[in-house]
Image (spheres, helix red, strand yellow):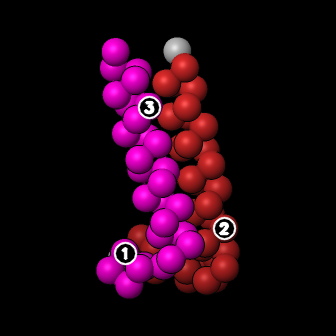
Amino acid sequence: MWGVVIGLLLIFYALFILYVSVKRPELVWDTYKIKYFRRIFGEKGASVFLFICFVIIAIIGIVLLNK
């Protein structure tokens, strides 16, 4: 039961991360954490890093849904 709930939450969170990495909304893109990623990785690198996070979190969410 809890695996399904956590899996769905992770999938929604992964979709939010994908949205942030593609659309770069100002409200989220200018937060301290994202600014730090941009300073370390650059603009494209931060987007790629967030996309990799999206893939990992989505996979974990799908695995939890299938258990």
Q: Position of residue 19 (x, y in %)?
A: 48, 66
Q: Secondary structure at mark 3?
A: helix
Q: Position of residue 31 (x, y in %)?
A: 36, 77
Which disc is residue 7 wearing?
3
Q: Amino acid at mark 3?
A: Gly
Name the residue located 54 percent from the left edge and 43 percent from the top edge.
57
Image-quadrant location for residue 46: bottom right
> Amino acid type of disc 2?
Val
Disc 2 + disc 3, Cβ < 8 Å = no
Location of residue 52 in the rendering, given as x and y in whole percent from the top left corner: 64, 56
Q: Is residue 10 magenta?
A: yes
- The residue wearing badge 1 is 28
Q: Which residues are magenta?
A: 1-30
What percent of the width, then of the height, locates residue 15? 48, 54
Q: Nearer the viewer, mark 1 or mark 3?
A: 3
Q: Quadrant of residue 62?
A: top right
Distance CA(mark 2)–CA(mark 1): 16 Å
| Residue 61: numbered disc | none
Q: Select label 2 or label 3 by which is in front.
A: 3
Earlier-in-chain disc, 1 versus 3: 3
Q: Which residue is mark 2?
A: 48
Taking the spot 48% from the left edge, 79% from the top edge, the residue there is 24
Dot 3 alpha-carbon crowd within 10 angstroms: few under 14, some 14 to 19, many 20 or more:
many
Residue 27 among those drawn in magenta: yes
Tell me the distance, in whole angstroms, between the alpha carbons under discs 2 and 3.
23 Å
Q: Left of 45 or right of it: where is 28?
A: left
